[in-house]
Image (cartoon, rainbow, N blue to C red):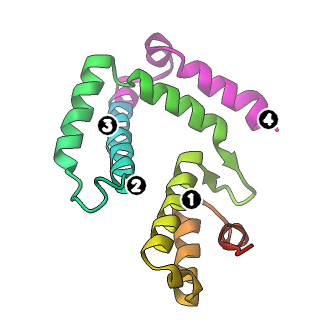
Amino acid sequence: MIYKQVIIPYILEAFDSQEALNKHLSATDIRKLKQGAINDLVALAEIKHSINPQTINEPFNYELEKEKAEKLVEQKGFIPDELLDQLKENIKDIDINITGERKSKAQTQAFIDYVLQLKQANPQALDDTQIIKLLKAKAKTDVGLTPDEVDELLAKD
């Protein structure tokens, strides 16, 4: 309750502008945030690449995407407008459960996309108990989904 009423609005205010970020963060924090923004931009590019049917079979060019992200961060500030909007949206979607794990809408969507790709590549894979165990482990560590949530996601209606 306090998280949604106090902490999220505070974080969103801190991300409101470059001036607000400078007010709330040290120079070291700003450097870390710049690197984090670059890493996030590269990760987003990799997710888009991996779910795009036109590029899914091509290798991902990490160095090129990192260079693009670095240029974007330098040109538009250390949190480009698009990423800032996405960070604000993701902060609203973070849910803290009793074990302290967090679930991000973007991470959950990436996991769902991964499962869909797996199903399209090999429909019988989701009938293999070992693969289901691995998916549950991946869901727990990557996304914070519980085994029951994975079962619900994989349920055959």
Q: Which mark is residue 22?
A: none
Asked if the residue at tag 3 contacts the one at tag 1, i.e. Cβ–Cβ closer than 8 Å, the answer is: no
Residue located 60% across and 19% down the image: 13
Q: Which mark is residue 51?
A: 2
Residue at mark 3 to residue at mark 2: CA–CA distance = 20 Å
- Specify which label sits upstream in the sequence, 3 or 4: 4
The amino acid at mark 1 is Val
Q: Which mark is residue 38?
A: 3
Residue located 39% across and 51% down the image: 47
The amino acid at mark 2 is Ile
Residue at mark 2 to residue at mark 4: CA–CA distance = 36 Å
- Specify which label sits upstream in the sequence, 3 or 2: 3
In percent of width and height, residue 11 lies at: 60, 27
In percent of width and height, residue 121 lies at: 42, 74
Q: Which mark is residue 2?
A: 4
Q: Nearer the viewer, mark 3 or mark 4?
A: 3
**Residue, far bottom:** 129
- Specify which label sits upstream in the sequence, 1 or 4: 4
- The residue nearer to you, when weighing 153 against 52, is 52
The C terminus - image quarter: bottom right
- Horizontal relation, residue 5 to residue 21: left or right: right
Asked if the residue at tag 4 contacts the one at tag 1, i.e. Cβ–Cβ closer than 8 Å, the answer is: no
